Amino acid sequence: MTESFVPPPGGTAKLAGHTVARIGFGAMQLANQGVDRDAALAIVRQAVDAGVNHIDTAGFYGSCNALIHDALSPYPGELVLVSKVGAARDAGGALVAAQRPEQLREQVESDLATLGVGQVGVVNLRRADAPPGLIASGDQKVLIDDQLAELSALRDAGKIGAIGLSNVSAGQLRHALPAGIACVQNSYSVLNRAAKDVLALCAGHGVAWVPFFPLGSAFARLPRVADNPAVVAIADELGVAPAQVGLAWLLAHDDNTLLIPGTSSAAHLAENIAAGSVRLPAASIAALDRLDSAVA
């Protein structure tokens, strides 16, 4: 990794008391089948060389933690590693809910071991009450207070630096705020603003907003931003990629937004990083503002 100063992509904002680049990196796609290990290591290093100092991962993604460790350890002092708990892989490799407090602790302990750190900077609690993805049932339907108590104990013990939430409602966030919440990860994009009430609550309480699926996804009812005709037209006018328009709108939309777009492609990573330099004209922002599809 280079030693010279690289401007933080997208500027900076606060995350759990740390100053981080507003464009970070989501590691999930590195564990996809067909991704070469050496290429995955190179992607992680490329991100950090480009000024990224906020990497999002999770033990249930697969091999991501080990890849991050092997690519970056010993870690740069300014790097913030963020993990997520609340799910696991069963014996067959299928993703299942793992919401019970003792399971959350096990996941944090596993993250510490596989990342090779004494503390995970932020641990996000991924609730499983509503789509997309996992829905808890049976003994996996756990009170958020019990989960926050366990994570608070881990924070008090110094094993995690801060607590975040993922896939929560405004009511759940409001209820959890007294526990000290550093960030929220919810599905959100220029085409899907169903969580705008959660974003407003985050902005009002100084909580970092870290949208997942910022460009849409294969999940039903989460439209792909890069396929939208209005987004494509603006991209053509500006001479940039449609995905860059979607990311630039999120950065311009709210100052407490941090992005963690993921990719296993060096070219796409460079494109995502460069989105931090895209400046949308006021008319383009206004046109994009009108695209809210109100996906529930």
Image (spheres, rainbow, N blue to C red):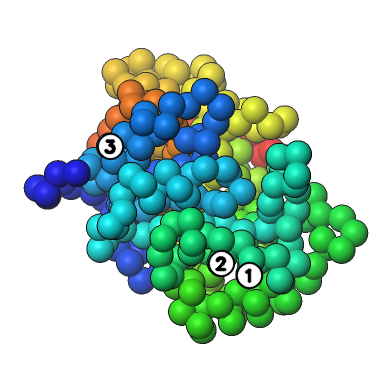
On-image quarter of the C terminus:
top right
Residue 86 circle label: none
Q: Quadrant of residue 273?
A: top left
Give the vertical position of 24 relative to 225 (above or below).
below
x, y (%) of residue 180? 53, 77
How many residues crowd around disc 3 within 10 Å: few (fewer than 14), some, or many (20 or more)? some
Q: Residue at x 75, y 53 (%)?
A: 97
Residue 46 circle label: 3
Q: In the rendered structure, which amino acid carries the disc numbered 3? A: Gln
On-image quarter of the N terminus:
top left
Q: In the rendered structure, which amino acid carries the disc numbered 2? A: Glu
Q: Marks 2 and 1: CB-CB under 8 Å?
A: yes
Q: Is residue 96 left or right of residue 182?
A: right
Q: From mark 2 to mark 3, how far is it between C-alphas?
A: 28 Å
Q: Which residue carries the number 2 mark?
A: 109
Q: In the rendered structure, which amino acid carries the disc numbered 1? A: Arg
Element class at badge 3: helix
Viewer-nearest residue: 174 or 115:
115
Q: Marks 1 and 3: CB-CB under 8 Å?
A: no
Q: Which residue carries the number 1 mark?
A: 105
Q: Residue at x 67, y 58 (%)?
A: 86
Viewer-nearest residue: 73 or 268:
73
Element class at badge 2: helix
Q: Residue at x 26, y 61 (%)?
A: 78
Q: Residue furthest toward the left?
A: 4
Q: Is residue 296 visible?
A: no
Element class at badge 1: helix
Viewer-nearest residue: 273 or 113:
113
Give the vertical position of 112 relative to 295 (above or below).
below
Q: From mark 2 to mark 1, how far is it between C-alphas?
A: 6 Å
